[in-house]
Image (cartoon, helix red, strand yellow):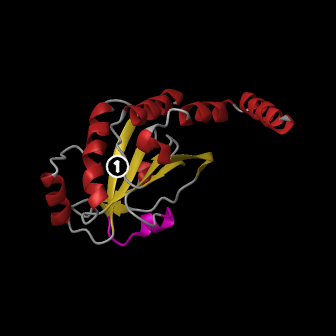
């Protein structure tokens, strides 16, 4: 009992001393359903600024999105859970249109431009980018070992959270979490 009380007191003091940690603790408490798989890092992680491409081979970087909270989803055309998850990411993007939250989808590995376009057409998604990481350079550097994996970046471009597997990104919990994060900006 004394150990539990000491742990609670220590946690409370740590949260009071570090308001950012307190805010993240409150945000983590919003996790429900699939969002329970979303883990937040104790401190934001710097990520490499590695290029990925669009359908026309134009180069892009995650640093292009600094200033907003970014939900980065790594996926592939052959991934069945990705097919289920992608419409929820499109709904999330629609919800946050004009707000400081952006969804960036990156097909990693061997995904043809035609295959990606066909994938989006079949699931009727029109509001998400068709980015590719054909040699998996970015995915490898970020430790993406399976698909789908979604990472959340803060406005400084640092990873603050990660969810492995598919999720309902248009759920009340996901929206509440991202609205709370955006309110921190």
Q: Where does the magenta region start and end?
A: 133-143
Above or below residue 91? Residue 49 is below
Residue extending farthest front: 1
Residue 14 lies, in percent from the top left, at 76, 34
User: Does residue 129 appear in this view?
Assistant: no
Above or below residue 26? Residue 134 is below
- In the rendered image, which quarter contains the N terminus? top right
- Tally of numbered discs: 1
Which residue position holds label 1? 104
Judge whether residue 101 is colored magenta. no
Residue 35 lies, in percent from the top left, at 45, 42
| Crowding at mark 1 (Cα within 10 Å: few <14, some 14-19, many 20+) | many
Residue 20 lies, in percent from the top left, at 64, 33
* Residue under the point 33% across and 59% down: 75
Relative to 108, is 130 on the left or the right? left
* The image quarter in which residue 23 lies: top right
* Residue under the point 30% across and 57% down: 81
Judge whether residue 141 is colored magenta. yes
Relative to 78, is 68 on the left or the right? right
* Residue under the point 32% across and 53% down: 105
Residue 102 lies, in percent from the top left, at 36, 40
Q: Nearer the viewer, residue 175 or 155?
A: 175
* The image quarter in which residue 11 lies: top right
Element on which disc 1 rests? strand
Q: Nearer the viewer, residue 148 or 140?
A: 148
């Amino acid at each position: 009992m004394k150990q539990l009380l000491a742990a609670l007191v220590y946690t409370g003091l740590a949260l009071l001393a570090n308001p950012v940690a307190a805010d993240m603790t409150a945000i983590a408490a919003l996790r429900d359903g699939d969002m329970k798989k979303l883990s937040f890092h104790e401190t934001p992680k710097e990520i490499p600024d590695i290029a990925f491409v669009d359908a026309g081979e134009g180069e892009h970087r995650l640093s292009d999105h600094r200033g907003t909270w970014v939900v980065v989803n790594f996926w592939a055309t052959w991934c069945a859970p990705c097919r289920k998850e992608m419409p929820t990411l499109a709904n999330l993007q629609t919800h946050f249109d004009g707000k400081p939250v952006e969804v960036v989808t990156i097909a990693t590995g061997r995904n043809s431009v035609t295959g990606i376009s066909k994938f989006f057409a079949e699931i009727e998604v029109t509001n998400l980018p068709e980015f590719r990481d054909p040699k998996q350079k970015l995915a490898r550097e970020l430790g993406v070992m399976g698909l789908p994996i979604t990472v959340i970046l803060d406005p400084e471009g640092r990873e603050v959270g990660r969810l492995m597997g598919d999720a309902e990104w248009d759920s009340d919990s996901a929206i509440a979490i991202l609205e709370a994060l955006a309110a921190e900006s």
